[in-house]
Amino acid sequence: MNNLILILGDQLSHRISALQAANRDRDLVVMAEVDAEASYVNHHKKKLVLLFSAMRHFADQLKSDGWQVHYHQYDPDHSAKTLEAVLAALVAEHKPDQLITTECGEWRLDSQIRRWQETLAVPVAIHPDTRFIAGKEEFAHWARGRKQLRMEFFYREMRRKTGLLMTPDNQPEGGKWNLDGDNRKKWTGKPSAPDPFRIEPDAITRQVVTDVNKHFPDHFGTTEDFHFAVTGQDAEAALEHFLDLALPWFGDYQDAISDKEDWLFHSILSPYINTGLLDPLLVCEAVAQRYYANQAPLNAVEGFIRQIIGWREFVRGIYWLNMPGYADENRLGNQNPLPWFYWTGKTGMRCMEKAIGASYRNGYAHHIQRLMVTGNFALLTGIAPREICDWYLAVYVDAYDWVELPNTLGMVMHADGGYLGSKPYAASGKYINRMSDHCGNCQYNVNKATEDDACPFNALYWHFIDRHRDEFAKNPRMGMMYRNWEKQKPERRQALIARGEWLLENLDTL
Ligand code: FAD
Ligand code: DLZ
């Protein structure tokens, strides 16, 4: 045996660079379910099922393709609790020439891996993660010397680089780069939203469900009704399901929120893309194909592709450009603890109850719930970034630090000073009412702001505007809010501030 080939739980692609560098006849592939990875945050139970089941399926596929695989199944009584400990035993046993792996997604583990050469006393070769369209260096090069880093300009580079939705003379298809303005319809029930793709658990997944319930009973969420794909083949079927049933309306209802439907017209592909079961570029090519076949409109196709080659790549670039300091950013000086109802969903605010409830049941909430409901509330109430970031990292099946952190700390909390948006995504209940049908079912009244039964988002919004005057009053995109605030009568402003203060002191009662 020559080399050990380490494949992490979110690297489940047959084209992963570590495997490309390996020799099927001589090398030993190592995959391990370990306590350190399963418990560094209170991962949703469905995420653990997805990861462990997908890892076990992937290992089986490698074996049937002729690879030698050492698979370390989760065992709480085993002395090896970390990837390093599993590898140390294998290094002692096999004395490999080197350890080969693909660069790891999270700074936390990446920094450990970069020390293994010394701690394991074996040469460690770390290959780039070619599943991303822009390498880390490429992003850093793009960022160098720019006064401001804006997703939109990076996205255009990625369109040019991939040729996605580009005309033969290198212009954006349809004449515009970004059709976001066409993607803001409220959904009133028609067309009906498709059921999410589902696959019934096989024997491996059923065993993992039992293991997770036994060993991780205190983790967030439930394993009930687990229906995610756990193989590349099934993830491709999930992609087809999205292309056929949801993509045509993805654009129109991208920003919508519903009281009745958890998934709307979203793809629910992030769990597969992030674990390696689906390749992001191939997904985008399949989506673009639907436009050229006249099966999906441009606002849907462009909107979707922008999320992947724009936002997804951009947040990864920001993460690696700024870590490790990025995780400690807190430019708005927020210190409040996370209200307990984020873990229980027990709150009278209907939009919050629904978003947290979906997160608990499904390990999923769509982007607008994450950004404009649970995220907006955390921003308005000044939750400490570390607490809200840990919550997002725990509760979603697609959550990994490299993508969760910039979205939460940057996009939601504006704690990095504005890489992810030129103004904070702060909004009152009016926005939630415009984009959803929650407010009609809520115990609070969205048309009131200062009374006891008024929607908390309303006074909290004005309190946020008032207390962050120094940070935002000069922001040209916030000028109108400050003018509106100043225009209100002093008694009204006082009442809003008083209600905001009360809410901030009584968050756990809402
Ligand atoms: P769709 O709406 O169908 O979008 C298509 C794809 O675009 C997604 O699968 C995803 O790969 C990509 N995408 C869309 N928006 C973003 C974005 N802002 N950043 C990166 N990729 C994006 N996404 C994660 O994958 N993991 C996370 O841990 C995560 N945490 C988030 C935390 C917060 C506070 C917010 C506001 C967003 C977060 N997102 C995260 C981004 C986004 O909400 C999810 O990617 C999306 O909801 C996944 O569902 P979907 O596959 O149905 O997405
Ligand atoms: C998320 C996760 C979990 C829950 N468990 C494992 C595991 O037991 N073994 C493993 O190799 N990977 C796991 N992962 C994914 C890693 O945490 C992931 O590779 C890093 O966070 C980098 O993104």
Image (spheres, rainbow, N blue to C red):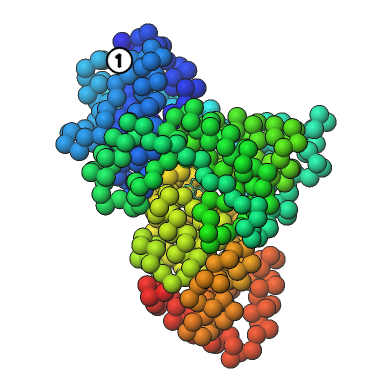
Look at the image and tell me in which quarter the C terminus lies: bottom left
Query: In this rendering, is residue 246 above or below 490?
Result: above
Taking the image as shown, residue 334 lies to the left or right of residue 484, namely left
Q: Can residue 59 be seen in this view?
A: yes
Image position, residue 396 (x, y; %): 43, 48
Image position, residue 355 (x, y; %): 47, 59
Q: Which residue is drawn at 74% across and 32% down?
A: 293
Image position, residue 382 (x, y; %): 46, 68
Image position, residue 398 (x, y; %): 46, 43
Classify 10 Å Cα crowding around label 1: few (below 14), some (14-19), many (20 and above): some
Look at the image and tell me in which quarter the N terminus lies: top left
Within the image, what quadrant is residue 48 found in? top left
Q: Total label count? A: 1
Q: Residue at x 72, y 46 (%)?
A: 299
Q: Residue at x 58, y 91 (%)?
A: 491
Query: In this rendering, is residue 230 above or below 226?
Result: above
Furthest-bottom residue in view?
491
Instruction: Tell me which amino acid carries mark 1.
Output: Pro
Query: In this rendering, is residue 455 above or below 133?
Result: below
Within the image, what quadrant is residue 302 found in? top right
Q: What element carries label 1?
A: loop
Q: Which residue is drawn at 57% across and 59% down?
A: 257
Look at the numbered disc 1 and say if its residue's Cβ is closer than 8 Å to ligand 2: no
Q: Can residue 99 be seen in this view?
A: no
Taking the image as shown, residue 35 lies to the left or right of residue 326, namely left
Dot 1 corresponds to which residue? 96
